[in-house]
């Protein structure tokens, strides 16, 4: 199975909160990332969290990490139409590797 | 500050033809990455350079793929010959020094279609 798993789609109404979930399998992962990809563009790093943290907040973004369940989530408050994009979860550092492993991405659709 | 530049943005070729992609990283970035992104998938690392040295190339299919980073700045990724399954987006990224805490900046990618 995949090392990093995400649901493929999420649809929310503008102004609501969005929560995108991710699970990973390797408990030795040291860094967990969220990237955003807009159509025709490369990936943009949104935020990351160290494995020894359980929460990180950055403006409208809140990352929660449950190491026991190997579950990571990204909450976007007051979701805007400009937030429509594909969001990738990635883990880094498993087994000392410098090769990041990305999930398949969650397509977030924000409608008015 | 200019971001990571890639060219061409789109390329359509027939199978068995060669193709090359070019990447110019952000000035001063020592580490350069080439990723493959298939439709509906996340990026997969093909090769990572520290300056001009390839330090992670275990996922590069060396029978048909090659890469170089002469002088530790620009990089070229080549496929020869291309196969139908090579149709994908090829992303280049760069970072200052590499490693998990160092932000990778991605270019827009080259979308390759092999007919």
Image (cartoon, rainbow, N blue to C red):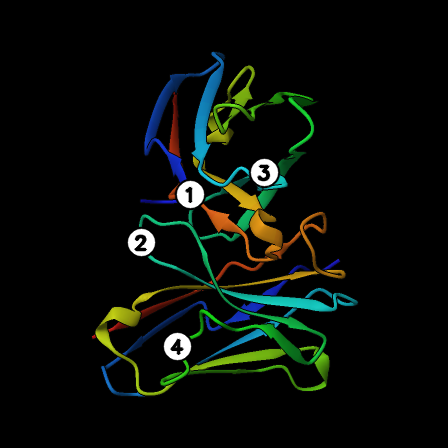
The answer to whether marks 4 and 1 sit on the same chain is: no
Q: Nearer the viewer, mark 1 or mark 2?
A: 1
B1 relative to B11 in the view: left or right: right
- Gap in Å between the C-alphas at discs 2 and 4? 19 Å
Question: Measuring 69% from the left and 55% from the top, which residue is drawn there?
Answer: B99
Q: Would you say residue A15 is visible in this rendering?
A: yes
Q: What kind of element bears circle 4?
A: loop
Residue A16 shows which numbered tag?
none
- Gap in Å between the C-alphas at discs 1 and 2? 13 Å
**Residue where numbered disc 1 is placed:** A103
Q: Chain of mark 1?
A: A
Question: Measuring 47% from the left and 11% from the top, which residue is drawn there?
Answer: A16
> In the image, residue B14 lies at what x, y percent?
23, 82
Q: What kind of element bears circle 2?
A: loop
- Count residues near mark 2 (Cα–Cα under 10 Å), then give few for <14, some for 14-19, many for 20+: few
Q: Chain of mark 3?
A: A
**Residue where numbered disc 4 is placed:** B61
Asked if labels 3 and 4 touch by Cβ distance under 8 angstroms, the answer is: no
**Residue where numbered disc 3 is placed:** A32
> In the image, residue B16 lies at what x, y percent?
25, 87
**Residue where numbered disc 2 is placed:** B39
> In the image, residue A111 lies at what x, y percent?
37, 21
Q: Nearer the viewer, mark 3 or mark 2?
A: 3
User: B109 or A14: nearer the eye?
Assistant: B109
Question: Measuring 45% from the left and 69% from the top, which residue is drawn there?
Answer: B59
């Amino acid at each position: 199975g995949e090392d990093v798993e995400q649901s493929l789609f999420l649809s929310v109404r503008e102004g609501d909160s969005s929560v995108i979930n991710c699970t990973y399998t390797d408990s030795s992962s040291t860094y967990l990332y969220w990237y955003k990809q807009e159509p025709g563009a490369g990936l943009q790093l949104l935020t990351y969290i160290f494995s020894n943290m359980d929460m990180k907040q950055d403006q409208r973004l809140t990352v929660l990490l449950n190491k026991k369940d190997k579950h990571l989530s990204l909450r976007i408050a007051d979701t805007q139409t400009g937030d429509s994009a594909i969001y990738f979860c990635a883990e880094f550092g498993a087994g000392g590797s410098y090769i990041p492993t990305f999930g398949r991405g969650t397509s977030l659709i924000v409608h008015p | 500050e200019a971001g990571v530049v890639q060219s061409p943005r789109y390329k359509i070729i027939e199978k068995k033809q060669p193709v090359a992609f070019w990447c110019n990283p952000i000035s001063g970035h020592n580490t350069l990455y080439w990723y493959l992104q298939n439709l509906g998938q996340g990026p997969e690392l093909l090769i990572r350079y520290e300056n001009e040295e390839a330090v992670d190339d275990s996922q590069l299919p060396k029978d048909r793929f090659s890469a170089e980073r002469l002088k530790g700045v620009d990089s070229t990724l080549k496929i020869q010959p291309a196969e139908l399954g090579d149709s994908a987006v090829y992303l280049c990224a760069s970072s200052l020094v590499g490693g998990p805490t160092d932000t990778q900046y991605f270019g827009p990618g080259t979308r390759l279609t092999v007919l």
